[in-house]
Structures are given as C-alpha cells and as structure tokens.
Image: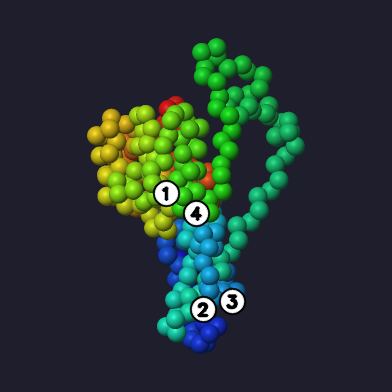
C-alpha cells in the first residue's frame, strides 16, 4: 500500500488525500512510487511520453524500472502530476582491477585469466538499446533486442495489428504492450495460441509489467516475459525469459 499524502489543487485550492497505485515489481514485491511529501503538484497542460513515466527502485530486489507517473484528477477539471522522490545516484564503481582485491571478470562472467572452453559459443556483443519516446519506438526496441538474441528476418506489423502480434520472424511471434497497465492473462494466452499455431516461440514485452495471473500462466506455458524501461533495455521477469537470454535463438 502506498503512503497517503495531502495534495492541494493550485487552481481551486481544494485539499485532497492521494494514495499512489501499487503494481507488482518483476520480483513479485508490491511497489508504489515514493511520493515527495511537501512538494507542490504540477498542473498537466500537455502530455508527453517521457512525462508519463518515472524511475522507481524496488527495496526488495534493487531493480530500477519505469512506472506510471502518479496523477490526480481534481473535481474542478484540473489534472495534477504528483512529484516522486528521485532514485539516488549509485556510488561510482571502483577503478578497474581493484574490485576488492578480486580478479576482474570478463563480460561473460569468467575471470580473464581462465580461458573459455573451446566448445563455448562466442559471447554476444553488448546490447545497444534505443530510447523509447513513442509506442512505435517500443516495438522497434523489442525488435532490436530479439535480433540481438539471434532471431533473424524480423518484420514489424502495421501499428495496432488486429492479431496483437507486433513482430514476426522465422520461428518467432512477439507482442509489445506500451501501455501503462500491466499485461493481463488473456494477452499472454492469445500470444501463446498464435505461437502454437505458427510453431513459433512466443515472446512478450511490456512497459508496465504483468498481472500476477498472467505471469503464472506464462510460466506454465513457457512464454518468455520481458519488461522494458524508457531506455529500451528489456529485462527478463520469468524463467523462460532467463533461459532465452542464456541460450539465445
């Protein structure tokens, strides 16, 4: 449950008590944006994609993700943006080669002095995300990530396809939900059915996460789930997604 804060409308001076919405973190912990108590709310006169999201850190797992910006609609017709406490900047990393006296590791997780086995697959290059500013950007960012995982010949569907399938490729169907609501059970099941009929892997990307029943169903069906932030960097949120990242296409 989020904390209650008093909010006064700057237009009509009406006093409100505001409680932010709670959403599940990717780790399953309930999480609400921490409100900045005492800060004046901002009247919304023009909306942008960036203003609709705010960075929030989960105290349980330390993950940082983008969450819907808290808003309050006053009875006078004004919509207010409620300020959120900014996430503290992380401490700078120690100089290279001095990480507590330990041998630094390579990007694959192996110490530099231990060679990879001759049969090991070459590590993928670092993923280069693209900033998400529009719903179409989210689809493009997901396509880039799937290509990075090894999928080829990925095609983007027209905007808002009736099928719900935003990306297709050989052995692949993917859906990208750029809305501010968590993806639901029906969304996951419909995507899985499309993948089943096409004998393809079904992959889901969402900016607002997933409902609990949707995550449970995805686990049972083996559907990889990813959440994306506005930097365009997907993060796996279930075991099928972890396995897909580990093995690639």
The foreground one among 83 and 96 is 83
User: How packed is label 4: few (under 14 Cα within 10 Å), some, or many (20 or more)?
Assistant: some
The residue lying at 55 percent from left, 20 percent from top is: 122
**Residue named by callout 1:** 206
The foreground one among 96 and 232 is 232
Q: CA distance from mark 4 to mark 1?
A: 14 Å
Which one is earlier in the sequence, the residue at label 4 or at label 1?
4
Q: CA distance from mark 3 to mark 1?
A: 31 Å
The residue lying at 41 percent from left, 56 percent from top is: 179
Q: CA distance from mark 1 to mark 2?
A: 31 Å
The secondary element bearing badge 3 is classed as: loop
Which one is earlier in the sequence, the residue at label 3 or at label 1?
3
Q: CA distance from mark 4 to mark 2?
A: 30 Å
The secondary element bearing badge 4 is classed as: loop
In the displayed image of the protein, which residue is found farthest to the top?
118
Residue 7, numbered label: 2
Q: Position of residue 16 (x, y in %)?
A: 47, 81
Residue 134, numbered label: 4
Residue 109, numbered label: none
Residue 40, numbered label: 3
Q: Is residue 118 above or below residue 160?
A: above
Which one is earlier in the sequence, the residue at label 1 or at label 2?
2
The secondary element bearing badge 2 is classed as: strand
């Amino acid at each position: 449950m989020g904390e209650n804060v008093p909010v006064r409308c700057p237009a009509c001076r009406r006093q409100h008590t505001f409680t932010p919405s709670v959403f599940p973190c990717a780790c399953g912990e309930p999480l609400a944006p921490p409100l900045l108590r005492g800060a004046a709310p901002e009247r919304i006169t023009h909306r942008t994609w960036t203003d609709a999201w705010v960075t929030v850190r989960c105290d349980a797992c330390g993950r940082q993700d983008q969450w819907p910006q808290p808003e309050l609609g006053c009875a006078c017709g004004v919509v207010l943006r409620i300020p959120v406490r900014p996430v503290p900047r992380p401490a700078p990393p120690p100089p290279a080669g001095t990480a507590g006296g330990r041998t630094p590791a390579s990007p694959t997780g192996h110490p530099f002095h231990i060679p990879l086995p001759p049969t090991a697959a070459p590590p993928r290059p670092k993923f280069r995300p693209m900033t998400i500013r529009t719903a179409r950007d989210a689809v493009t960012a997901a396509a880039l990530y799937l290509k990075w995982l090894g999928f080829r010949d990925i095609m983007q569907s027209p905007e808002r396809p009736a099928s719900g399938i935003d990306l297709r490729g050989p052995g692949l169907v993917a859906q990208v939900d750029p809305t501010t609501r968590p993806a639901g059970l029906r969304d996951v099941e419909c995507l899985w059915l499309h993948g089943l009929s096409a004998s393809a892997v079904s992959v889901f990307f969402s900016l607002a996460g997933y409902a609990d029943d949707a995550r449970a169903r995805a686990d049972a069906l083996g559907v990889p789930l990813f959440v994306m932030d506005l930097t365009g960097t997907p993060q796996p949120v279930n075991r099928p997604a972890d396995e897909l990242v580990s093995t690639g296409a």
